[in-house]
């Protein structure tokens, strides 16, 4: 009995500091692939240096803090929308962000680290990458590293997690990865396949973001962080996570989130004018259009093949065709693209076919994924169209001595194409819109460009409108052209 | 063989049907049909619906497989249980078929409907095929319609195109499956007129029909099929005017009202 009482007493004591009437503070953070910031360890427990800082903050603020899972690239919009009270997830103090939200004092000073494969000899410095379209550098969506790469004109691919970026570097799809030092230490320092190229550069600050009008909250967090620096709590945490370094030792105590921080690279605060982002959006539109046409051509070929296999193949082939249709109609496109881009190279390597992974570029994976998926839809459309040609047409052709193959090619198919045209047009428009899913595998198509630009500039409405106009400018002519084709073919068709 | 001549087909061919049996599941559609058709004759197949007329017609050019007996069309013979593609193909080159619902190819022009088989199947030079097709369209009085689409034609015009299409292969026989049933009385005559005209060329014509009047006027022989057997067979006068069987009298009394 005594044991139970002491347990209850102990839990009351632990709970005591949080007994204030305030509701818990909600902390917005992305635990997916976020080591060493905040991530799930092998036992599926949430750990990371930010988790430790938040625990220390709870004590200092005397208030419970509740974790809210939120996509990293949407943290700032989510904060402004009020989905949580503060965001803390390696958010860099960028000039464009400072205009939209309020930053607390920094809790860590990061620098950028360029990571390459061991033995890299084609370049020796970050500066050599600028303007060189043959070198592809990976980074993360909405990071200071990405802004730096855009500013310096480095060809880059933006991932949603560091894991994927470093994996693609290992696979040879990237020539380098530029990311904040904590991530480089976490993912690359212990990997014998990688080497750091040059010293860390372009210092910046991680700070906690609160909505612009929450001055009281910002002030109380500032005081708590200053306390933690004063009593060594913060240094203990950062040392435990092996990211404490001389730079932080020297400058963290006096660093602020003010604009004129002594190490601030003034150039990184660029104004996002239309002249600056429109060319990027237009390039995204070009990729979107190209991807649409290429994957639709693939889908048409697959569709016709699978439809004829299903209708006229021997039984096992028919079963395979049905299996194909059900499989690719049932698997979500996003999952398929992830598998093709991130999973397939290792599957191929496991089958003793290494090196093929390099050819699976984001565009190739998106082309294949969209083609396979829409091939399944097309197969059903074309099967239905072929079957809706009256059987009497087969007999009339047979009575004229036409063999089956000739009849199919010359009599049935031309009629089926006309019947299939309206649903196929709908399919094309759907595919066109689904190309946006390819942004998840770093393809710089229109949607991805929009996300990058909008999140960097925080001009969600302005850039969003222009992006929507570009989408319409592509899809409306598509619709008009197919209706014209329908009309032209329809005029020659009839009972 | 003298069938290079474009407009006058060579003499018709003979058809010999022996013990023809056709089943659908356990139902016998044709129950041992025995029938001879002389070269150049026009034969009308009449009888109540469900009597097996259309099925018999479709067995003649292999559109329908059968379960017993044999069919000899000219020099080619089909046997039950042994569908020989080569024989079927040869028969289809010598016997044309015309359907109740026309079955023109809607995506092709009238002219292309007629030239399709000569060019694609027989490998005829497209230019001569077109010239011949125009002559055939002239013959069915549709030369002015050669560039139209089937959808722009009336029913009677469509059926005349179908006849021209069948003639384009220079057949020696024609199988006609209720070719006037979908037409109104006026246009029926356009089509039947063309058929009578063909009779003069010596083509063998086997037609499933409900046109008792036309059968009496134009058919050399009339065959009354009922319940899968030949109930009566003879000249139009024999079968239509003085039927010998009870079954035939009942049917004729009904259709002649």
Image (tube, grey):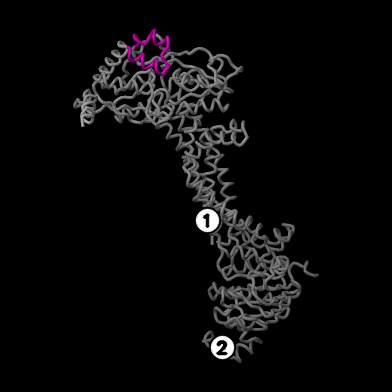
* Label 2 Cα neighbours within 10 Å, binned few <14 / some 14-19 / many ≥20: some
Q: Is residue A110 visible?
A: yes
Tell whether A77 sits left or right of B23.
left
Q: Nearer the viewer, residue B131 or A220?
A: A220
Which residue of the protein is positioned furthest toward the right in this rendering? B1
Q: Residue A114's spot in the image, x, y percent?
A: 51, 18
| Magenta span includes A243 | yes
The residue furthest left is: A21
Quarter location, residue B95:
bottom right
Kindly identify which numbered label has been placed on residue B247.
2
Residue A302 image point, x, y percent: 58, 47
Q: Position of residue A373 (x, y in %)?
A: 51, 44
Residue A308 shows in the view: no
Chain of the residue displaying label 2: B
Q: Which mark is residue A384?
A: 1
Residue at the image position 42 percent from the left and 35 percent from the top:
A468
Separation of residues labelled 1 and 2 (CA atoms): 45 Å
Against A162, residue B113 (above or below) is: below
Mark 2 falls on what kind of element?
A: helix
| Part of the protein shown in magenta | A232-255
The secondary structure that dominates the magenta segment is helix
Which residue is nearer to you in this view: A277 or A48?
A48
Please tell me whether mark 1 sits on a helix, a strand or a loop: helix
* Quarter the N terminus of chain A occupies: top left
Tell me the subunit letter for badge 1: A
């Amino acid at each position: 009995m005594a044991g139970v009482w002491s347990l209850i007493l102990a839990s009351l004591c632990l709970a005591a500091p949080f007994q204030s009437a305030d509701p818990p503070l909600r902390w917005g953070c992305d635990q997916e692939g976020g080591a060493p910031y905040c991530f799930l360890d092998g036992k599926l427990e949430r750990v990371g240096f930010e988790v430790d800082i938040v625990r220390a903050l709870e004590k200092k603020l005397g208030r419970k803090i509740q974790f809210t899972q939120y996509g990293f690239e949407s943290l700032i919009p989510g904060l402004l929308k009020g989905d949580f009270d503060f965001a803390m997830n390696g958010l860099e103090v960028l000039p464009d962000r400072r205009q939209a939200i309020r930053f607390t004092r920094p809790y860590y000073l990061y620098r950028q680290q360029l990571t390459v494969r061991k033995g890299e000899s084609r370049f020796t410095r970050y500066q050599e990458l600028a303007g060189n379209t043959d070198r592809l550098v990976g980074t993360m969506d909405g990071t200071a590293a990405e802004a730096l790469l855009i500013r310096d004109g480095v060809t880059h691919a933006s991932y949603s997690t560091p894991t994927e970026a470093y994996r693609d570097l290992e696979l040879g799809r990237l020539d380098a990865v530029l990311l904040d030092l904590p991530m480089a230490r976490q993912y690359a320092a212990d990997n014998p396949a990688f080497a750091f190229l040059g010293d860390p550069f372009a210092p910046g600050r991680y700070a906690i973001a609160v909505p612009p009008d929450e001055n009281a909250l910002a002030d109380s967090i500032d005081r708590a962080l200053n306390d933690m620096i004063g009593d060594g709590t913060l240094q203990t945490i950062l040392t435990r996570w092996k990211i404490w370094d001389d730079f932080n030792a020297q400058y963290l105590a006096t660093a602020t989130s003010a604009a004129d921080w002594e190490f601030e690279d003034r150039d990184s605060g660029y104004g996002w004018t239309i002249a600056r982002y429109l060319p990027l959006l237009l390039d995204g539109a070009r990729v979107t259009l190209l991807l649409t046409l290429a994957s639709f051509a693939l889908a048409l070929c697959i569709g016709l093949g699978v439809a004829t296999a299903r209708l006229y193949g021997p039984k096992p082939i028919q079963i395979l065709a049905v299996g194909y249709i059900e499989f690719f109609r049932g698997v979500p496109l996003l999952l398929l693209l992830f598998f093709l881009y991130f999973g397939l190279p290792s599957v191929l390597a496991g089958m003793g076919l290494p090196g093929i992974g390099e050819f699976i570029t984001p565009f190739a994976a998106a082309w294949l994924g969209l083609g396979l998926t829409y091939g399944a839809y097309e197969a059903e459309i074309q099967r239905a169209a072929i079957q809706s040609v009256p059987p009497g047409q087969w007999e009339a052709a047979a009575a004229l001595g036409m063999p089956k193959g000739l009849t199919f090619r010359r009599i049935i198919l031309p009629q089926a194409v006309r019947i299939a045209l309206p649903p196929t047009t709908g399919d094309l428009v759907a595919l066109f819109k689904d190309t946006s899913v390819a942004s998840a595998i770093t393809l710089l198509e229109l949607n991805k460009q929009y996300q990058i630009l909008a999140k960097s500039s925080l001009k969600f409405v302005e850039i969003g409108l222009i992006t929507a106009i570009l989408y319409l400018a592509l899809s409306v002519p598509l619709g008009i052209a197919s209706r014209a084709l329908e009309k032209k073919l329809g005029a020659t068709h009839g009972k | 063989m003298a069938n290079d001549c474009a407009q006058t087909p060579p003499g018709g061919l003979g058809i010999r049907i022996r013990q023809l049996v056709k089943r659908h599941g356990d139902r016998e559609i044709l129950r041992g049909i025995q029938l001879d058709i002389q070269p150049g004759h026009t034969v009308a197949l009449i009888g109540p619906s469900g009597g097996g007329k259309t099925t018999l017609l479709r067995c003649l050019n292999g559109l329908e497989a059968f379960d017993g007996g044999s069919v000899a069309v000219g020099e080619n013979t089909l046997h039950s249980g042994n569908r020989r593609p080569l024989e079927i193909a040869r028969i289809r080159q010598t016997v044309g078929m015309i359907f109740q619902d026309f079955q023109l190819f809607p995506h092709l022009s009238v002219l292309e409907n007629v030239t399709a088989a000569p060019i694609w199947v027989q490998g005829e030079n497209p230019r001569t095929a077109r010239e011949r097709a125009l002559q055939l369209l002239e013959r069915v009085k549709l030369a002015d319609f050669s560039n139209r689409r089937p959808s722009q034609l009336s029913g009677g015009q469509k059926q005349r195109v179908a006849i021209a299409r069948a003639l384009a292969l220079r057949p020696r026989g024609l199988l006609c499956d209720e070719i006037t049933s979908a037409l109104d009385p006026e246009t029926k005559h356009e089509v039947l007129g063309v058929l009578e005209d063909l009779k003069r060329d010596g083509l063998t014509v086997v037609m499933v029909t409900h046109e008792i009047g036309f059968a009496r006027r134009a058919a050399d022989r009339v065959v009354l099929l009922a319940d899968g057997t030949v109930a009566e067979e003879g000249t139009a006068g024999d079968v239509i005017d003085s039927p010998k069987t009870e079954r035939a009298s009942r049917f004729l009394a009904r259709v002649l009202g």
